[in-house]
Each structure stands twice: as structure tokens, then as C-alpha cells.
Image (cartoon, rainbow, N blue to C red):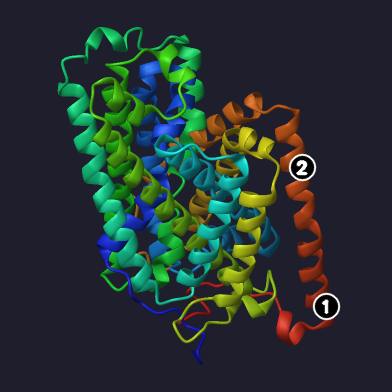
Amino acid sequence: MSDNTLKKELKLTNLISMAAGGMIAAWMVEIKFWFELSGPGAVVSLITCALLVLPLCLIYSELTRTLPYAGGENIWVSNAFGWNAGWFSCWGVMLLYIMAMPTVAYGIASMVGFLYPITFFQTKLIAAIILIIWFFLTNKELKILAKMQSIMFWSTLVVSITASIIFMTNHQWSYDNLTPWFPNGFAGYGAAVGLLIMKFVGFDLIPQLSEESNFPKKKLWIAFVGSLFLTVLIYGLAVIGVGGIVSTEWVAETDIVDPRVADIIGMHWLGVIIVVMGSLTCLTTLSSFWLCASRTLYGAAKQRQFTPMFTALNKEGQPWKANIVVGILSMYFTVFAPEAWINHIYTIYGAAAGVVYLLVTLSFLKLRKTKPNWERPYKVKAATVMGIISIIFTLWVIYSSVIAMDMGAWIVLGLYLLLGIPFWAYAKNKQKTDPEKWGAVILSPDNQK
């Protein structure tokens, strides 16, 4: 494409399914961690976390309508606090997307193991094959990937809700099994509220793809709220469904929860269906985060925070060079990164997400004051109140994550931050030596009319 403009191909339902697909991953594997934190009360922690994420969704809705450019958070932070702050917010966002990749491979491997045991090497091999296939798919027209993801997501929605209803209506289900709701007390509940932010990272796919949507932008808030609601619905029903049949101790000792519960009630066929649809859900997660990462690089390249070559689009309108980089990174962290990496994901994810969302909230409040004349087709009501709630929540997320991080997590996070410094320094140097190609740009309504 000659004008380096992304194609507008996404419907509202596509955006909802792609955002929710980024949030809904292999819950039947990860549910063990939720129970470890707050037992069956994890459903309350999930709802609380979702309610606290809602003000963030509204803030994202306004910023996406005001600054509807691929790159999302980076663009907003750059406008509020400058090019350098935007660069580091971009690097933090990339960490969120990259870290999501290993959960996909291990989630699929755990589910496949329900049908046929596989070795660790076979797990890596399956992951590599999936990533290679997905690389080629991400370079096709986005509407093709969007249709595939919509089919997989809406099918998963039906299967997961149906399975939870079957569990809750089975004679072995008992409310007594759900007690105590919070075996770790308020401390466990509070920790879960902060750490479960990882399960809601995905709504931020919406600003990354807003440039490519072809429905009235005034409906963007529906995409945010709709994807959030569907995520809580699936996760919440899953917790209640399995928690009423098995104990918290049993959940801690099993490998993949929902299919094993299906076996307990004599419905192996249901377990097989859950595994198949769960694997497809992992693919929607992979797709969502891959798209987010490539659009993040695309937007950063537009601002000359990374090499301008990342703005290159193929004939299908896809940022193919950015896709190559995302493919390499995802391949490394899924196939070649040490297995211990998985153990640090939740805490690092929470810390990174908390910092990024805090910067977005502060940018929202600042731009309201410094750019009052910008057109805002959607405006958050009670903006200051929403901002304060989001600030308190994001600080709690950061605190909950930091106190849960061990030395290994700190080392991984530190290495990632250090890795970014040479790229930042390179861009700053190029601004001086090649200002014609690398002159700093901040995308805004003032220069994008």
C-alpha cells in the first residue's frame, strides 16, 4: 500500500471477540492459581477486579476516540508527558504482549495432555508449529483473521457457559463445597484483585485496532464493556461450576481442572469438547496479543521511536516487518526461553500492567487540562472521580505484584528493562544524525488532520 494506511475492516462484533479473546485464555489450567489465591472466592475477586477495570475501560474509550491511532497507550502518554515517556510506556506494553505468548503454548500442551500425554520437547514443537502458522495468517487480510477469531471465540463462549451450567445442575454439585469462600481471608482476596489484572489485559487491544475499525466510533465503549462482561461471565461461571463439585485442595493437585471435573461426573465427552474449544481459545489469545504487539511497533515507528521500516505494509495492509519482529520474540519466549519464565509471569505482568495503566490514567487527566479544545466524541462522565479510582486501583495492582515477586522475577524484569535502553539510545542518536528520517513525531489531532 502506497500510503501506509491500515485498512478499515473490523466490525464491532469482531472487535469484541478479538478483545475478549485476548482476555479469555486457558482458564481450566490457570484456575488453579486463582483458587490458590482466594479459593472459590476467586469469583468475587474477579468481579471486583473487573469493576475496578471498568473506569479504565471508560478512560480508554475517551482516549481512543480522541487519539484513534495504532499504538494506543504510547500515543497518549507521548502527548501528555513527551516522546521519552511514550517510548518507555511502549516498551512496557510490548512486555505485556510478549509475556502472553508462553501461556498459550503451555495452555495448549496441558489440554492436549488430557487426550494424549506429550513430552516437554513435544510441547515446544507444537508451540513452534503454531507460531509459524500464525505468522503467515497475521500477514493476510485482517478480516480473514477476524472471522476465524470470531468463530472460535463465540463457539468457546457457548461451550464454556454450557459446561458450567452442566456442572452446576449435576447432582454432585453442592453449595457446601464452595465454603469456605475465602480460605486465605481478606489478604488472599486482596492479592487476587491485584494479580488477576492479567486476566483482563486484552481490552487494550481495542485502541491498537481502532484505526482498522469500520463502525461508528461512538460505539467503541460497547467493545470495551462487552469484552469485559463476557470475560467475567466465562471465568465466574467456571469457578462456581467446578468449585461446587471439587475441593480447593483437589484443584491445587490436578493438571487441568474443567475436563477432569467432567470425568468425575461421568462425562468424558464433555471434557474432550472443553479441551478442543479451550485450545482454540488459546489461539484467539495468541492472535490478539500478536496483533497488539505489531500495531504497537507500527505506531511507535510512526513516532520515530523505532525504525521507520516498521510502518511498511504489505498488499494485504498488514505491518509485515513488525510481524517478523513479533514472530521472532514470540518464538523465543515460547520455545527457547527457560521453563522458569512461566513461574514469573503473573507477578511481572501485574507490575508492568499497573505501571502502564497508571501512566494512561495520568495522561487522561493531564490531557483533559492541557488540551481542552481537542474534539472528544466520547467524554467520560465524572472524569476526575474515574481518574482517582483508576489511580488507586493501579497502585494496588503494582503493590500486590511487587510484594509477590521473587528474585527471579526481579532479574527477568530488570533484564527486560536494560534490553530496551540500547533501542531507546539508538533512536535518540538517529534523531541527531539523521533528523530527516528520524525527526521525533507525536501523533495528535493537531498534525493528523
Using the rendered view, name the quadrant where residue 321 is placed: bottom right
Relative to 235, 76 lies left or right: right
Residue 284 visible in this rendered orientation of the protein? yes
Q: Give residue 385's position: percent from left, percent from top.
A: 40, 39
Circle 2 crowding by C-alpha within 10 Å: few under 14, some 14–19, many from 20: few
Q: Callout 1, which amino acid?
A: Lys
Q: Is mark 1 on a helix, strand or loop?
A: helix
The residue beneath circle 1 is 432
- Between disc 1 and disc 2, the foreground one is 2
- Left or right relative to 2: residue 156: left
Marks 1/2: CA–CA distance: 28 Å
Indicate left or right for 408 with 90 as reference: right
User: In the figure, residue 323 lies in which quadrant?
Assistant: bottom right
Residue at the farthest front position? 116
The percent position of residue 202, horizontal first and vertical second, equals 44, 50
Which residue, given by chain and number where applicable, does mark 2 sit on?
414
Q: Nearer the viewer, residue 412 or 397?
A: 412
Disc 2 residue type (three-letter): Gly
x 70%, y 42%: residue: 338
Q: How many numbered callouts?
A: 2
Question: Residue 251 appears in which quarter of the rendering?
Answer: top left
The disc label shown at residue 347, or none: none
Q: Position of residue 181 (x, y in %)?
A: 35, 12
Mark 1 vs 2, N-terminal side: 2
Residue 122 image offset from top left, x and y in percent: 57, 47
